[in-house]
Amino acid sequence: MMIPTVRYSLLFSLLFFLLSCGERSADNPAEQSHQAAVDVIEQPELLVYSARKEHLIKPLFDQFTVQTGIPVNYITDKEGPLLARLQAEGDNSPADILMTVDAGNLWQATQIGVLAPTTSTILAANVPANLRDENNHWFALTIRARTIVYSTTKLASGDLSTYEALADSGWSDRLCLRTSKKVYNQSLVATMIAALGEPRAEAVVAGWVANLALDPFSNDTKVMEAIVSGQCDAGIVNTYYYGRLMKSKPELPLALFWPNQQGEGSDGRGVHINVSGAGVTKASKHKQQAQQLIEWLSSPAAQVMLMDLNQEYPVNSSVALNAELASWGEFTADDINVGEAGRLQVQAVKLMDRVGYR
Amino acid sequence: MVIDNSSTRLSASQPPLLPGSPAVAVGRRWPITIQSLAKFAAIATVLMAMMPLVVILLGWSSDQTEVWQHLIATQLSTLLRNTVVLGVAVGIGVTLLGVSLAWLTVMYEFPGRRWLDWALMLPMAMPAYVLAFVVLGLFDFAGPLQQGLHALLGDRYSYFDVRHEVTVILVLVLVFYPYVYMLARSAFLSQGSEVMEVARVLGATRREAFFKIALPMAKPAIVAGASLAVMETLADFGTVAIFNYDTFTTAIYKAWFGLFNLQAAAQLASLLLLFVGIALVAEKQSRGKGRFTQSARKQHRFRQRLSPLAAFAATAFCLSILSIAFIVPVLQLLHWVLLEGFEAVDQRYLGLLSRTLILGAIAAFITVSLALLLAFSRRSASAKMRTFYDIGSLGYALPGSVLAVGVMLSFAALDQQLIAPVMEWLGIPSRQMLVGSVLALITAYWVRFLAVANGPVDSSLQQLKTSIPEAARSLGVSGLPLLWIIYLPMLRPGLFTAMVLVFVDVMKEMPATLLLRPYGWDTLAVRIYEMTSEGEWQRASLPALSLILVGLLPVILAVRASARR
């Protein structure tokens, strides 16, 4: 009995040692620069709850810390759990900023009252009015267009016109879509409800479902791969997934199409766009520094980084598109306030359930 | 060679238990006995494990009729059908696969048996979502198989869609069969071959001996393993999401994320709990009153040699299962790692590895200790109390995120209602102590995985020959010394199996780790989440492979421990 006990305690101590090594090897450049900055001026650490992934936000936060001396920590998770945590923590929450994708999520964060309004002339100048909360609870930082992707071997761009046209009976067995459980599709349908009214939107989505060549996919990349292998002719995806796939396999016969560019009323309303964004939390004890970080993220330097890291469009119109984004061509975007996607999301989810969009 | 050396160990440790202080005297000397303390601790454990469940039940305090009407009108029948089909099919699948593999490796000798015996446990280290994305990567339209066939046959080749109900079931069976395999294997091992020999001498055919003797004796272990697999299946979100297969769990998440309605999600989750509760009670009832204990004599094992043809078939069967469930996915991950390069490896990687290990080790130790406590308490409890103890392990059937939110909400309530006022009273500036602490994370782990530890601990305690502790008691050993000198050494294999299962499960755990980890406590599973959540499965290959390799450590330890016996 004794010997195994000794052996296991040794094992445990080794683990603890490894662990403390991990801690000490300064995972966090923010902390190192924090040390440097302390001599100048004592800066509080910011804590960001982020539904954006580490590899997209860390380079930005590191840069911010270098420039301002304000260290930025972050906890990543899905939006739902993060919102639940913010709400449960209430005034005790250590979080200063909530950062997430999808306007619907930002709208929901405002609804449950975890965000504080931020008055900033910089943000007002950098972020267009339809891409921020009307009461300034959150601000978009990047734009992603959800558009049509098609097989260049089977179609010409002239065969496509609007999202709604994909519901025509001629498209039977030719369409591929991602699952309705993804919030990007929920927002797309929500803005369709805003543009077309619920009955027409429902008819369109029912038409899509009838035209599906295959069960909906779990992500946009799988949609494009199905198109490439000839299972379907077109689908609806976010532009950066297209960028990512084409970067690794430039020879694929795929192209983007910008729908709803011409015509009267809803036909010409423009491409559906969604955003990623951020807001200062109500519980934040460092509102000024938190605001500073969001302002910095909307500045041209940070916007270029965001654009290059994930091929998303900048919100700051003073930033020129990089070569890849520019190569996809210009388009008119739907100028509806993106917060509408949140307001109508529940309606959209139920609509998609009703027509059997899985 | 399996030798039960508990009796030798007993005699070796006999000197300190010579009659001296009679056990009953402990109770007379102090008003509080070890037994009553243990009972108190067991009840506290169950109450704590129930906290998140209560939070979820509180979801019924709000009226969600509208959501229910919507669900009934649209998806509910499909969801119920899919969930039942998946649960039943995976339950049957893991039982057939796990028992047949265990029986083969324990009873027969065939080429490769010695290493297949332990290698068949390896798929344990494979997270279900990893196998799912590897399967999809290999077999979907852009995968090497279909692309290869297309290149070979040209346009004559018609693509197939791998995303099918059957694929989901197969993936889950391949990932979860080791639960049954490990438990059934140690049950068969501890039976010894005499039982079978006696049955054969008495004229039973081999088949009769298996179905009438060996199988019923191993039933508690097999059922424990299969129920773990089924509960894990019901709670699974990663795999079904990858295949876009709608189950009760996907509906829970849809209500939460899509309808922004955590209460409705909680109501759905509590229904899932109800199903599982009913199934568990039914299982307990069907188990009957029979009790099997290990035989007293030293056990020996003669493995039967198979005819060359049968031996070949046995090797091929084991090897093909191992290949599909482990070797091929690992090779695919390795291939992706080589494609992606090792950019992701920086000095933080060591931290990820060590935190994964340390959280797994701490959680495994605590969980198994608590499971042991509950197992003992259950033995001497009334039927009502036994049901109460069983409630403690229901958390396993909850989807991870839902349980994590339950734990988080209960800790937030404690923080605000209990700790904050005390701190205010003491004049310390109020801040959160529990939410976002390692304590909360470890609590979520043991609440979730208590059921996993219960299986092996309980079934090894049930197989324990009662006469040895009884003899020790009659010699005046009771309370902690009895636990330390008699029970722990005798239960060691079961405890060890439990530790390994929990250790590996904790390392693979994703939603609770994501929600409850303090800043700086990222683990490998967190890194996998970061990559896979946007569908970048190839980039997740390095952390996934690391997780599997790290998960092999405890499995190998367990294998070595069982080889030593």
Image (cartoon, coloured by chain):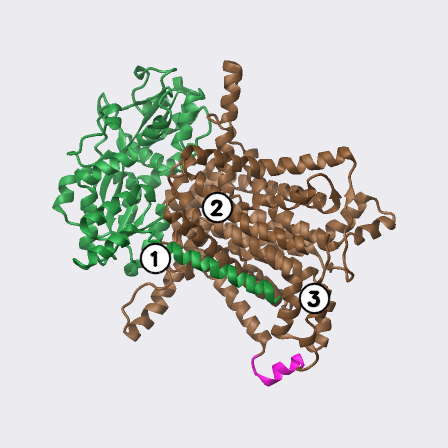
Chain colours: A green, B brown
| Residue B547 image label | 2
Which chain contains the residue that carries disc 1? A
Q: Residue at x 63, y 58 (%)?
A: B494
Q: Nearer the viewer, residue A335 or B164?
A: B164
x%, y% of residue A82?
Answer: 34, 50
Distance, label 1 to label 2, CA atoms, is: 32 Å
Distance, label 2 to label 3, CA atoms, is: 36 Å
Q: Residue at x 41, y 54 (%)?
A: B405
Q: Are marks 1 and 2 in contact (CB under 8 Å)?
A: no
Q: Quadrant of the C terminus of chain B?
A: bottom right
Q: Are marks 2 and 3 on the same chain?
A: yes
| Depicted A244 relative to depicted B397: above or below | above
Q: Nearer the viewer, residue B314 or A286?
A: B314
Q: Nearer the viewer, residue A145 or B360?
A: B360
Q: Are marks 3 and 1 in contact (CB under 8 Å)?
A: no
Mark 3 Cα shell of 10 Å, populated few (<14), some (14-19), many (≥20): some
Distance, label 3 to label 1, CA atoms, is: 52 Å
Task: Residue under label 3, please give it.
Answer: B9
Q: Which residues are magenta?
A: B22-32
Of circles 1 and 2, which is in front? 2
Task: Residue under label 1, please give it.
Answer: A88
Which chain contains the residue that carries disc 3? B
